[in-house]
Image (cartoon, rainbow, N blue to C red):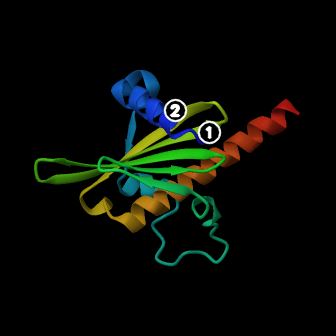
Amino acid sequence: MDDLDKIEAYFKNYSQDLPRSNPEGIIDIDLTVLRELGLLGYHIPSNYDTSLTRYFHVIETKEKITLVNEQFVVWIIPEKMGEISITYVMIALNRGEILKLELIFSASGVYNNSKLVLRVLEKYLAEIQENEEFMKSLKS
């Protein structure tokens, strides 16, 4: 989906009713999640694939950054709650005329830095893509 008005409509719809849109809830990034995603190592392995986030169109507004490509739409929403800065990331599958919200994660405190948020995003995009390919193979 490349229609920015439709993408914005999906964002508003999903963000207004998160419990219905994403019953699994919001994943809070912490040490346990980083360990599960394999992101606690100091060095990035040589076979680490960063190609998923290289080819996004970027749309920046005051309230969020939207990343769009043929597979995904990602909304990155910075918020401030009192003195605490939080970054929310919503990932949706781009299925042509339909965007299907897959997951939401948030980062705050020491976990709320751009490098870490982007590495977590890459890992989740890779997992979602792998699951989608597996589901397609089952249908074949």
Locate residue 88 relative to residue 101 in the image: left or right: left
Q: Look at the picture and state if 115 lies above or below 112.
A: below
Residue drawn at (67%, 35%), measured in percent from left and top? 96
Q: Nearer the viewer, residue 32 or 108?
A: 108
- In 3D space, how far apart are the residues under numbered discs 1 and 2 (Cα atoms)? 8 Å
Are the residues flagged by discs 1 and 2 in contact, CB closer than 8 Å? yes
Label whose residue precedes the other's in the sequence (1 or 2): 1
Q: Residue furthest top?
A: 20
Residue 2 in view, yes or no = yes
Q: Which of 77 and 42 is in front in this view?
A: 77
Report x, y in % for residue 89.
41, 47
User: What number is the disc on residue 36?
Assistant: none
Residue drawn at (48%, 35%), measured in percent from left and top? 5
Locate residue 59 relative to residue 123 in the image: left or right: left
Q: Look at the picture and state if 114 lies above or below 107.
A: below
Locate residue 11 relative to residue 79 in the image: left or right: right
Q: What element carries label 2?
A: helix
Q: Is mark 1 on a helix, strand or loop?
A: loop
Per the image, the residue denoted by label 2 is 6
User: What number is the disc on residue 1?
Assistant: 1
Locate residue 22 relative to residue 64 in the image: left or right: right
Residue drawn at (47%, 57%), measured in percent from left and top? 120
Residue 23 in view, yes or no = no
Report x, y in % for residue 113.
33, 64
Q: Which amino acid does label 1 sit on?
A: Met
Q: Look at the picture and state if 22 lies above or below 61.
A: above
Report x, y in % for residue 25.
40, 32
* Crowd around label 2: few <14 · some 14–19 · many ≥20 (10 Å): some
